[in-house]
């Protein structure tokens, strides 16, 4: 099993008392698998992704990656292997190149070298961004282009699991198709993908799970 | 009009104070006529001005008479404590539990800048001379306090505004400083801009209070200018030191031990 989560719990205080967003969620993801998580707005789908990425303070439960517990791996190293791409694309000020190599400018990867120029160029070409120069100001990218650059920035770091929060929301058809292609290729290379989606099934996911009232279940089960 | 025979300075008596208060009464009448609803606030503020400044005057007269180093240090600590609390009141977005950081920052700023000025620049004798140390400490703390509060407020407001980007960077393995450092720079810059602007316009757009006071008290304008330059520079230094220290000492408290930013939605979670 690539990623396993057991009895994940998370609650918040609200005016009505304690609200259980995740109420004992169990989840498994195999290598090469793409799983979609659906559910009504506010049901906790984004919260689940953040819990799986160890980016949710106050969340309880056991997480294991390829048999190793999250406690053994440590939160920072866990996040490098189980990478969350938030819904809102957040490119930093600078060029497309500086955004793509940003992970290697961080202390945690200071011992590694960033991908060479031709790898960055090939990566852009591979997702339909042939006309986007590496020196282009990232602020001048379209929404769809920025989404692809943000996804590339994560996939270039070669995580084991990708957690994508509504990766094709607000994208035009062509951009959504490119993002889907990137996702499929990542899974084909042996990675696992969890997507939170509102759209109809795009036939990419092998499983669809529904999160409602803090519980996760198979769609249609 | 009465004049101090020793200095030739025109002194202000009760009649003059009542006349000055008449200006506030005029503003109160204007507020009443325009339905601004400020009459009560103006009255309370005026009473507080009288009470606080006369109290300060009597305390300073007593302190100057006692001439004790321990008393000067004690008063400075009290002023620093008040400044630390005021800064937090003016920065509602700052994390809770940073009173200690605020106090330590003001302690370092207040003591270092005040004594650099009194001991090395003005060279007062004795080193604690209350007539110099207390007013200068008051100016250092009072003027830097606004800039520090602004820096603190802007830093935490900017962190909240950038929480999406901070999450994305943390997901890539960024440390809190790597993810949130830009907001710290933005906040400190914001805290220093009013002081820098004030330095750029002093003497052209306005004549500062201390220089005005010294000139009215009979000092030579060039001597008053030299004092004012020292004051402007020490205030900018104090603001910079205080803003950097307060923000850096408190910044990490908005992140969990494992480096996750506690955005608004997470602060009430359990």
Image (tube, coloured by chain):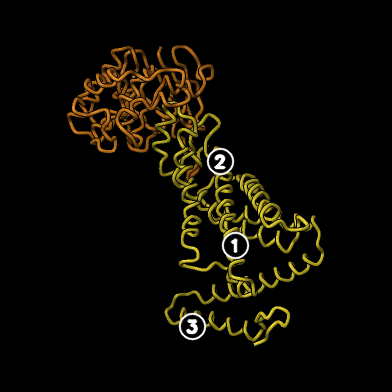
The subunit letter for the residue under badge 3 reads B
The residue tagged 1 is B226
Above/below status of B162 relative to A204: below
Position of residue A65 in the picture relative to residue B100 (left or right): left
Spatial separation of the CA atoms under disc 1 and disc 2:
33 Å
Which numbered mark, 1 or 3, is in the foreground of this view? 1
Relative image position of residue B1 (x, y in whole percent): 64, 87
Badge 3, how many Cα within 10 Å: few under 14, some, many 20+? some
Q: Quadrant of the N terminus of chain A?
A: top left
Whether callout 1 and callout 3 share a subunit is answered yes
Mark 3 — residue?
B29
Q: Is residue A15 visible?
A: no
Precedes in sequence: disc 2 or disc 3: 3
Q: Chain of mark 1?
A: B
Q: Residues within 10 Å of mark 2 (few under 14, many from 20)?
A: some
In this view, the mark in front (2 or 3): 2
Q: Quadrant of the C terminus of chain A?
A: top left
SS category of the residue bearing label 2? helix
Say what secondary structure mark 3 lies in: helix
Quarter of image, res B61: bottom right
* Quadrant of the rendered image containing residue A151: top left
Residue B248 shows which numbered tag? 2
- The secondary element bearing badge 1 is classed as helix
Chain B, hue in figure: yellow
| Relative vertical location of residue B226 with respect to residue B49 in this rendering, above or below | above
Q: Are marks 1 and 2 on the same chain?
A: yes
Tell me, yes or no, whether the two marked residues, 1 and 3, touch with CB atoms within 8 Å: no
Q: In this structure image, what is the colour of chain A?
A: orange
Chain under label 2? Answer: B
Distance (Cα) linking label 2 and label 3:
47 Å
Image position, residue B194 (x, y; %): 48, 56
């Amino acid at each position: 099993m690539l990623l396993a989560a057991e009895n994940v719990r998370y609650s918040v205080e609200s005016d009505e008392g304690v609200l259980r967003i995740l109420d004992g969620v169990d989840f498994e993801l195999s290598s090469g698998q793409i799983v979609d998580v659906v559910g009504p707005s506010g049901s906790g789908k984004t919260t689940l992704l953040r819990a799986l990425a160890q980016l949710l303070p106050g969340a309880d439960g056991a997480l294991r990656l390829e048999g190793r517990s999250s406690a053994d791996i440590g939160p920072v190293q866990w996040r490098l292997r189980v990478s969350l791409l938030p819904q809102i694309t957040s490119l930093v000020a600078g060029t497309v190149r500086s955004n793509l190599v940003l992970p290697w400018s961080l202390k945690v990867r200071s011992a590694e070298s960033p991908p060479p120029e031709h790898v960055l160029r090939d990566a852009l070409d591979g997702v339909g961004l042939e006309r986007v120069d590496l020196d282009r100001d990232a602020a001048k990218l379209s929404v769809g282009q920025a989404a692809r650059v943000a996804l590339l920035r994560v996939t270039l770091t070669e995580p084991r699991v990708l957690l994508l929060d509504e990766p094709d929301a607000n994208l035009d058809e062509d951009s959504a198709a490119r993002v889907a292609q990137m996702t499929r290729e990542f899974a084909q290379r042996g990675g696992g993908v969890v997507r939170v989606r509102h759209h109809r099934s795009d036939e990419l996911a092998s499983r669809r799970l529904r999160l409602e009232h803090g519980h996760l279940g198979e769609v249609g089960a | 009009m009465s004049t101090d025979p020793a200095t030739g300075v025109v002194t202000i008596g009760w009649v003059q104070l009542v006349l000055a208060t008449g200006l506030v009464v005029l503003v109160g009448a204007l507020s009443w006529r325009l339905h601004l609803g400020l009459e009560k606030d103006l009255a309370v503020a005026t009473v507080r001005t009288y009470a606080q400044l006369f109290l300060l005057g009597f305390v300073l007269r007593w302190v100057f008479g006692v001439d004790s180093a321990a008393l000067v240090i004690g008063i400075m600590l009290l002023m620093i404590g008040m400044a630390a609390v005021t800064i937090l009141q003016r920065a509602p977005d700052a994390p809770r539990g940073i009173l200690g950081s605020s106090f330590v920052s003001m302690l370092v700023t207040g003591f270092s800048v005040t004594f650099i000025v009194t001991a090395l620049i003005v060279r007062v004798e004795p080193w604690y001379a209350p007539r110099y140390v207390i007013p200068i400490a008051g100016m250092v703390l009072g003027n830097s306090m606004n800039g520090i509060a602004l820096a603190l407020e802007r830093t935490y407001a900017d962190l909240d505004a950038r929480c999406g980007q901070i999450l994305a960077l943390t997901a890539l393995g960024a440390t809190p400083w790597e993810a949130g450092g830009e907001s710290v720079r933005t906040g400190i810059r914001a805290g220093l801009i009013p002081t820098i602007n004030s330095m750029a316009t002093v003497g052209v757009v306005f004549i500062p209070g201390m220089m005005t006071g010294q000139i009215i008290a009979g000092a030579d304008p060039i001597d008053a200018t030299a004092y004012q330059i020292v004051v402007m520079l020490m205030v900018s230094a104090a603001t910079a030191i205080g803003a950097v220290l307060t923000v850096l000492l408190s910044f990490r408290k908005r992140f969990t031990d494992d480096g996750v930013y506690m955005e608004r939605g997470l602060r009430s979670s359990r």
